[in-house]
Amino acid sequence: MSAMYNWGFELKQLLRLMLPILATQVAQAGFGLIDTIMAGQLSAADLAAIAIAVGIWLPVMLLCSGILMATSPLIAEAIGAKRQQNIPVITHQALWIAIFLGLIGMLILQLMPQFFHLLKVPENLHAKAGLFLHSIAFGIPAVALYSVLRCYCEALGHPHVVTIISLLALPVLIPLNLIFMHGFAFIPAMGSAGAGVANAILQWVMLFILIAYLRYAKAFTQVKLFQQFDSLDPVWAKRILKLGVPIGMAIFFEVSIFSTAALVISPLGDTVIAAHQIAISITSQLFMIPLSLAMALTIRVGQYYGAKNWQVMRQVQHIGFVVATVFASFTMLLLWLFRGWLIHLYNKDTAVFDVAYGLVIFAIAYQLIDAWQVTAAGCLRGMQDTKGPMWITLFAYWIIAFPLGIYLTRYALFSAAGVWIGLITGLFIACILLFIRLRTTNNRLNQSGFYSKKVTNPF
C-alpha cells in the first residue's frame, strides 16, 4: 500500500468520521447559542445571568461527559484488537458510571447558587442565574447517559444517528424556550431562567429517542447492547475511571478557565459581561471544528493503537495536524471578515457591541494554537495517555492563565482584555507542552517494542 494511498485513504476515513461529529457538536453548541441570542433579546441583565449560569453549568456538564469519553478509546481499542465481545461490557459499565456522575452533577448544580456571594456574582443576577441552574440540573443525568451512547455509536463508525437527533432537537429548543421564557397558558414567564427548563426537558427527550433507535436499528443488532445488561463490574469500572477521570479533568480545566472568565470580569458590570459572553459564544461555536477533529482522531488513533500498528497511527496523527491547521486558518479569516455581523446577531446595544468587537480580535489570535493543542490531546487519548494532558492543562490554565487574567483584569486595569490575554498565554503553554508529550509518548511506545512491524490496515 503506497504512502500516497495511505494518506488519501486515512484522510477520507478521518473526514467521514469527523464531519457527522462536527454536525453533532455544532448542533449541541447551538443550544447555548440559541439560549444566548434569545436571552440577549430580553435584556443585558438576562444575557449576563445566562453568562454566569452557563459559566458554572458548562464545566460541570463537560466534566461528566469528559470522564465518559473514555468509552470511545476503549471501544476503538477493542475493535482494533479484534475483541468485539468487550464492546457491550464497556458500554454497560460506562452507563453505570454515567448514572452516578449524573446524580452527583445534578446535586452540585443545585447547591452552586448558595456560593454566588463568594464568587462575587452581582446581586441583581442571583435570582435569574440561580433558577437557571436549579432547572437545568435535572438534565445532567440525561446528558451523562447520552454521552456514553454517543461514544458507543461514534466508535462503531455510526455517528450519523446522533447527528440526526441533535439536528432535529435544535429547532425544537426555540419554541420550548419561548414557552418557558415568556410563559404560555398555565406556565409562568421565567425570563432567561426558562432556558434551563427547556434544555433539561430536551436532553431527556433526546436520550429516550437514541435508546429506542439503538434497541431496534439493524446496524446495531450484532452488538446486542440491550438484550442483556451487565451488573456493575468493579474491574471494568476502575479501568474506565482510570482512563476517563484524567480526560474529564483536562476538559474541565480548559473549559472552566473560559467559563469562569465571566466571573472574573463580573465586577465590571452587565455591559462588559454581556460583551464577553458574546465573544466566548462565537468562538465556542468555531471551537467545535477542532474539537470534532480531535474526537475523530481519538477513535482512529485508538483503533491503530489496539492493532499495534505504529506506522499508520503516526500517519493519522500527521494528517490530523494538517487538517487542524487548514480549518483554523479558515476560522481566523471568517472571524476577521464577519466579526461585526456575528456580534449583531446577539445584541444591538452599541456599548455591548464596542466591547465585544475588541474581544473577538483576541479570539482570532488563538485559533491556531487552540486547534493544535486539542488535536494533540485527541491523539494522546487515542493512545490512552490521559494523565499527562490532565497535569498539563492544570498547569497551563490554572497555574498560569487564571492568576494572570485576574491580575491584568482587576489590578493592571486591562478590563476584560486582561482575561483574554491570560487565556491566550495558557493556550500557548498548553500547546507546547502537549506537543512535547505527544512526541515523547510516540517515541516511548515505539522504543518499547509495543508496535508490530507489519503495516496492515485492519479496518
Image: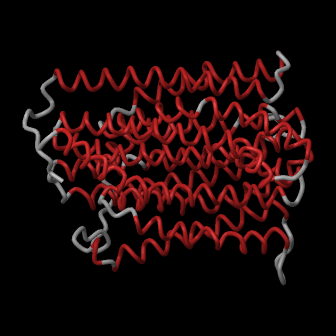
Q: Residue at x 51, y 47 (%)?
A: 289
Residue 187 % position (x, y):
82, 77
Which scheme is used to colour this image of the protein?
A: secondary structure
Residue 99 % position (x, y):
48, 58
Residue 159 visible from this viewpoint = yes
- Image quarter where the N terminus lies is top left
* Extreme residue toward the bottom, this view: 185
Q: Is residue 313 left or right of residue 27?
A: left
* Extreme residue toward the left, this view: 454
Vertical arrangement, residue 353 with respect to residue 148, above or below: above
Vertical arrangement, residue 178 with respect to residue 114, above or below: below
Residue 234 visible from this viewpoint = no
Q: Residue at x 71, y 66 (%)?
A: 197
Q: Is residue 82 left or right of residue 227?
A: left
Vertical arrangement, residue 422 with respect to residue 351, above or below: above
Vertical arrangement, residue 407 with respect to residue 144, above or below: above
Q: Closer to the camera, 2 or 388? A: 2
Residue 188 % position (x, y):
86, 74
Res 115 quadrant in image: top right
Number of numbered discs visible in the structure rendering:
0
Q: Residue at x 75, y 55 (%)?
A: 36
Q: Residue at x 35, y 45 (%)?
A: 240
Residue 239 % position (x, y):
31, 43
- Image quarter where the C terminus lies is bottom left
Q: Closer to the camera, 243 or 443? A: 443
